[in-house]
Image: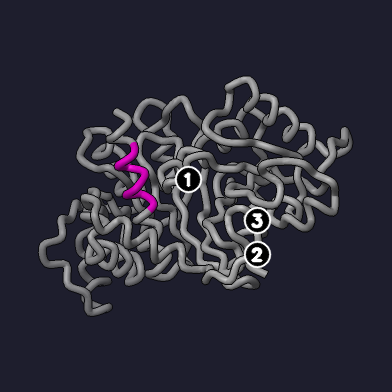
Amino acid sequence: MLFRRDGAASGAPCGMYFESLLERCRAMRPIRIGVVHPCDAVSIEGALAARDRGLITPVLIGPRAKIAAAAAAAGLSLDGVELVDAPHSHAAAEAAVAIVRRGELEALMKGSLHTDEVMGAVVREGTGLRTERRVSHVFVLDVPNYCKPLLVTDAAINIAPTLTEKRDIAQNAIDLAHALGIERPKLAVLSAVETVDAKIPSTIDAAALCKMADRGQITGADVDGPLAFDNAISPEAAKAKGIVSSVAGDADILLVPDLEAGNILAKQLVYLADAEDAGIVLGARAPIVLTSRADGVRARIVSCALAQLFAHRIVEAA
């Protein structure tokens, strides 16, 4: 059964959200994005494909000879593409962050280097892109049998977040939801059960996060939890448990207890429910497209669209 935003059964086609997102981005100015150490075919192809969709103006940062060789081997032309030479991956990450700090790039995109290398440069004290907010990753999933985007956080950066860090993780995801045009997102704080249990720490955090939302420490969303996954996304499951909530059964954002839970959840939706995924890192001075080696060109294109939307939101808020 398919569900509309109001939870009622619907025969409307689902799983087409990313197409509508890309169409929306057609009217927007491309953003300048630094592609860090793009020394393999998919990193270069993804950046060029996003450029051809009008989403980004890529600046390739890394070893010039390696980038050129990878492009030539894949039959890709770098004519007209700006390239900043850096001797190795660590230097490329440092150079990319420095260019963002100078205001010459609006976002970053990971190429063929380890996540730790990029994020190490981003969060470095004094020279990185830190803000007062904890950085976190948000997956946006286009799930065929869920008729709106589903945001899952954090499944890539924060391993075992504290309550304070979960507050920032929640706010980052809410801010992205706003950039996507969701005016009042519904955030479900997930656990294994929907009742507060002192033996399950994630339920205590969930209750605290709800009270933080009540007191204005988390803004711009309806927040409820603890909620188990089923009663967060299924109106029938919420009704069966007797849960009365604006969030239960209709969540836009799923805030997971820890990285392991989030990573498993997101990948299950992709590999078992035919969901498409994209994602970005938020909480730094600029959005970061943190691609996986397993991501294809399509995921990179949509992730660039997310970065474009969020970068424009930063400009509009300034």
Q: Does any portion of residue 244 appear in the rendered image?
A: yes
Q: Is residue 102 magenta?
A: no
Would residue 112 be seen by someone viewing this image from the given angle? no
How far apart are the alpha carbons under marks 2 and 1? Answer: 21 Å
> Which quarter of the figure has residue 205?
top right
Q: Which mark is residue 139?
A: none
The circle drawn on residue 182 is 1
Q: Residue at x 58, y 22 (%)?
A: 216
Position of residue 179 measured from the top left corner of the image (x, y, whole percent): 40, 43
Q: Which residues are magenta?
A: 306-313
Residue 15 position in % (x across, y down): 51, 68
Give yes or no for residue 311 being in the magenta stretch: yes
Mark 1 vs mark 3, foreground winner is 3
- Going by the numbered disc 1, the residue's amino acid type is Ile
Give the residue pinned by disc 2.
9
Number of marks: 3
Outermost residue, left side:
80
Q: Which residue is pictured at 46% across the width and 59% down the height?
A: 278
At label 3, counting other C-alpha atoms closer than 10 Å, the crowd grade (few under 14, some 14-19, many 20 or more) is: some
**Three-letter amino acid code of the residue under disc 2:** Ala
Type of secondary structure dominating the magenta stretch: helix
